[in-house]
Amino acid sequence: MSESSICQARATVMLYEDANKRWVPAGAGGQAFSRVQIYHNPVANTFRVVGRKIQADQQVVINCPIVKGLKYNQATTNFHQWRDARQVWGLNFGSKEDAALFANGMMHALEVLSALGDSGYSSLPRPVQNGPSPEELEQQRRYHSHDFRVSSGAE
């Protein structure tokens, strides 16, 4: 199974120039809107942000993996940013609706990634099992030990 898009939005993709302390448009040809999508690979359980300019050449201006622990900052309603291993990315969205849609997709990706165990496989969804879960057993143990303490106490 190949990657599938879990959301798309219209935004200008920006890069932060640390040396000059300013944001610059990603790619050639200056500032232009791009179609920015979050792709999910269900086999590898990976996510990435891909943006192509909405122009004839459809230049790729971002192809950035979303990694566990990534800090996604919604700096303003329409401008969001994050850092990868090499640079700081910014998205200047065309509307607050696009910004909210993309942020929801990013939050979903980060939640899925944070649920990954050390094995690299998702702990979601839970495997089907017969009988009570470890959490339910613990709750039952606490409940019964609490009952015992209350009933054996001096009144």
Image (spheres, rainbow, N blue to C red):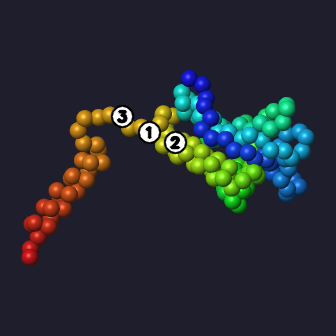
Disc 1 or 2, which lies upstream in sequence? 2
**Up/down of 147 relative to 139, above or below:** below
Secondary structure state at the residue bearing disc 3: loop
Q: Which mark is residue 124?
A: 1
Q: What amino acid does circle 2 point to?
A: Val
Report if the CB atoms under discs 1 and 2 are less than 8 Å apart: yes
Q: Residues within 10 Å of mark 1 (few under 14, many from 20)?
A: few
**Of residues 148 and 89, which is closer to you in this image?**
89
Instruction: Please identify the quarter of the rendering in which residue 57 is found.
Output: top right
Mark 2 lies on residue: 112
Residue 109's spot in the image, x, y percent? 57, 43
Instruction: Please identify the quarter of the rendering in which residue 133 is found.
Output: top left
Residue placed at 44% from the left, 39% from the top?
124
Q: Residues within 10 Å of mark 2 (few under 14, many from 20)?
A: some
Residue 113's spot in the image, x, y percent? 54, 41
Q: Is residue 66 visible?
A: yes
